[in-house]
Image: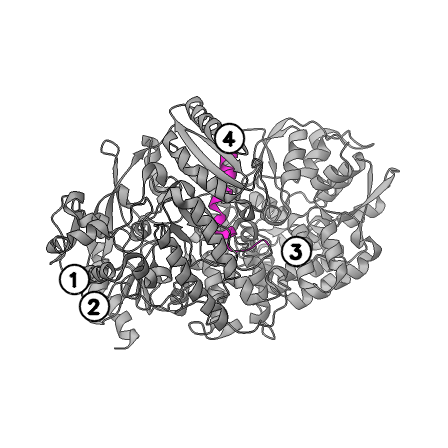
Amino acid sequence: MPATDLVRALAQSVRGEVESDATARALTTMDASNYRRVPQAVVAPRDAADVAETLRVCREFSTPVVARGAGTSIAGQSTGTGVVLDFTRHMRRIVGLDPSSRTAVVQPGVVLDDLRAAAAPHGLTFGPDPSTHSRCTLGGMIGNNSCGSHSVAWGTTADNLRSLRVLRYGGGEPLHIGRGLPDAPPGLDGFAAGHLALLRTGFPELPRRISGYALDALLPENGPDHARALCGSEGTLAVVTEATVRLVETPAARALAVLGYTDEGAAAEAAPGLLPYGPLTVEGMAADLVREPAGLPRGAAWLFVETGGATPAEAHDRANRILRAADALDGAVVADPAGMRTLWRIREDAAGTATRMPDGTEAWPGWEDCAVPPARLGPYLRDFRALLAGHGLHGTPYGHFGDGCIHVRIDFDLLTEQGVARFRRFSEEQADLVVAHGGSLSGEHGDGQARAELLPRMYGDDMVGLFNRFKDLWDPDGGLNPGILARPARLDENLRFAVLPGRPVDVTFGYPHDGGDFSAAVRRCVGVAKCRTATPGTDVMCPSFRATGEEAHSTRGRARLLHEMLAGEVITDGWRSTEVRDALDLCLSCKGCRTDCPVGVDMATYKAEFLHHHYRNRLRPAAHYAMGGLPRWLRTAAPLAGVLNALARIGPLAALARRLGGIDPRRGLPVLARRTFRAWARTRRAPATRETVVLWPDTFTDHLSPEVGRAAVRVLESAGRTPVLPARGVCCGLTYVSTGRLDAARAVMRRTLDLMGPATGAPVVVLEPSCAATLRTDLPELLPDDPRAAALAASVRTLARYLEEYAPDWTPPRLDRPVAGQTHCHQHAVLGDAAERRLRERAGLTGELSGGCCGLAGNFGFEKGHWDVSVACAEDQLLPAVREAEPGTELLADGFSCRTQLDQLAGRRARHLAEVLAEGLPPEAGEAPGPGARRDPGGPARWWLRASRRPR
């Protein structure tokens, strides 16, 4: 029957969302593996009854079903060709948590970190903790029998599972399965009894044996435990609708012993000897994974050994005992939480970091998590490195050394027929190598399509035959996740790269880190989904996902849509795609993913590229003309600033201006400076100094906040520098880039380079972080063949960094007050804020600025249709931080957008760091000291003309 009939039947039977549009299907074609399968529809069930109805309808239509959590599986098991069950939207409730029995009852869509947060007040946690803990779901963890770095202490998911409530594809009553519970599919009771000898002898003894079905859990001496046998079955046996899990006591304090070794073999051989000391983790990595040393001890490989205790002293003492006992080249104990977070981030980001070799070459999963007995890990790693070399391949092993489990991404060529053939040959030899060392093909992420074909090499044909029979007892119709684990598809089928263009597409940006290939840039997204993290932190990525919770508004979701746009199968209209346009519409172009994504996806650049092609030779939205051409409009309007400000105070005229400019009616219009920064600078008589410095007169500083420029001049002069402004007309091109007007952006940039002339290579202080980021990144990437672009990009400095590098002896004024506010997202992503932190510390400005994005993000928050998301982004971190600030706290925001958002949403004025520093300098002749000098006496009475009064 046609898919439309299936979708119609589902929509009539299921209360949750049923989606079969191109966007929904494109978002679920891939997980974090090398594989791609296109579904017919996506169902987001509201409860177990919805799941049962979905299975009933799919059975009637002979349509397969795959259950999906966060979609971070490495082996391809969370993709399917039928109906995808998305549990992350509704079935994410913690049904109950009992501290006395140390158990919790959860729905399959519960995110691990949410469960851990709920258990934390009781001193409890869920032991298994994959590096994707901020977004992976309990259902996915049960499907894969996930482990994580603390498995040496608390075991795998199967070790922490009490019981499951499940539904079968074939219908029937829900089953409640677990040790001592009588429920089981018909025929399963006698299954184990008929094969006791094989079940008792056919499974290797090692802590990370995840491959195949856990049939040994059916042995009489082991329960039988049907829940444990189902754990790790990758959605091929039944659909979990509820789970009762065990919680463990979490140590009140922790410490981290970081041990350096000469090579990874030495680290691997040392790991088993540390287990008797009762560590919580024994993690390992080699130097080829670490891009920056980040304070690690001497060595070419390291072990991270975490200890716990009732007190910090006890945890520290245990870590010291391990440090003394370890035969390490060097070592250190880190006990402060910030230091430990910094080190753990290196390890947790490895799943993404390892996708690129040090030379930028792509690397892929496929042999991501083999495991061997810990005592065999050293010899195995040496043999594994030799096997890689024999095939001309490279990888960066890391992982759970205490459990003998190794993660690695390998630079397979999965784009050509020859490369795929080598992938198969290597896979077969790698399977034999793992088995020779007594190991498991999978030690954490499951077999999926990547390794299930090779299970006979590990278990033999008889055991694999039992796997198939076990599958048939649970799912005789074969409707659950076919082609995965039992009777699997070949490991070199359904590769996601096969559908991409064979040649680079014609693009405008240079994509220097991807060989100029837009397809390669899009391929950067491997699906680890760090962008789906909903918990606020110091990172920026991904503000739109945190605002909406929709996959289409995550960095990964947008990358998936771009991938399908290039593939042309699900999304068929290329650059004209409305699906891609709509998903990118809520991208704030914050550039947070450029830094926060472990693989450096740069969605802001991809968005600009897409808009450039999408609207080429077509009428654009009004905002693209109004705000995209802001520099030109403001230069034209400058002589009439007073008149225009007065006209903007007339309600109907202001409303008309918003409507014509595509601006949201709830947004206030900015007041134009009656005297621009440039005009002020032309009349200023600078003190005589030995050196000059170029001060960039960005559009926002020049026309909208000239007080920032004046303050920066005073600060630079106090440091013994004379600021000089480049020729009139220089512009970074930011607004043209953010609206995808790339031809105009390049023309503006070329004119700027011409005007800069010989000053192109001299240090340039840029006060507006978004303009500095544009000059640093977009300029050389849009003009890759112009050496002047690279020279200007390299010369860009923030005020704090310039003072630190070129005026190190300058002493800032001592201000001694707390600060709050936000680090600009572009500064976080492109420029870094280390120099600003050090300058604030020297000036006595204490406290931390929040992460995230303010939500205004240049033109984004002004555009009609973006108000709700803009406000939600501000409420994520910025506005709460400002509300919680004590009286007398200085509000800092170097970005014009951040200051605007605070003023319009909170009625609070934030200032640029330059303004705060200038206030502390001795007053100039004729200037009133102190706070009276903050405002330009010739400036407007109010910064903003509000659209309406809103409750504060």
Q: Amino acid at mark 4?
A: Val
Disc 1 marks which residue? 171
Q: Nearer the viewer, residue 556 or 740?
A: 556
Q: Is residue 210 left or right of residue 344?
A: left
Rendered position, 861 above or below 297: below
Q: Are marks 3 and 1 in contact (CB under 8 Å)?
A: no
Q: Secondary structure at mark 1?
A: loop
Q: Amino acid at mark 3?
A: Thr
Q: Which residues are magenta?
A: 334-358
Q: Is residue 644 left or right of residue 390?
A: right
Rendered position, 436 above or below 263: below
Q: Nearer the viewer, residue 938 or 85?
A: 85
Disc 2 marks which residue? 59
Q: CA distance from mark 3 to mark 1?
A: 56 Å
Q: CA distance from mark 3 to mark 4?
A: 36 Å
Q: CA distance from mark 2 to mark 1?
A: 9 Å
User: Along the polypeptide, which appears first: circle 3 or circle 2?
Assistant: 2
Q: Amino acid at mark 1?
A: Gly
Residue at the extreme bottom: 1
Instruction: Look at the magenta stretch and give its main secondary structure.
Output: helix
Disc 3 marks which residue? 777
Q: Nearer the viewer, residue 32 or 928?
A: 32
Count of numbered circles in the view: 4
Q: Are marks 2 and 1 in contact (CB under 8 Å)?
A: yes
Disc 4 marks which residue? 334
**Crowding near the residue tagged with mark 2, few <14, some 14–19, many ≥20 C-alpha atoms within 10 Å:** some
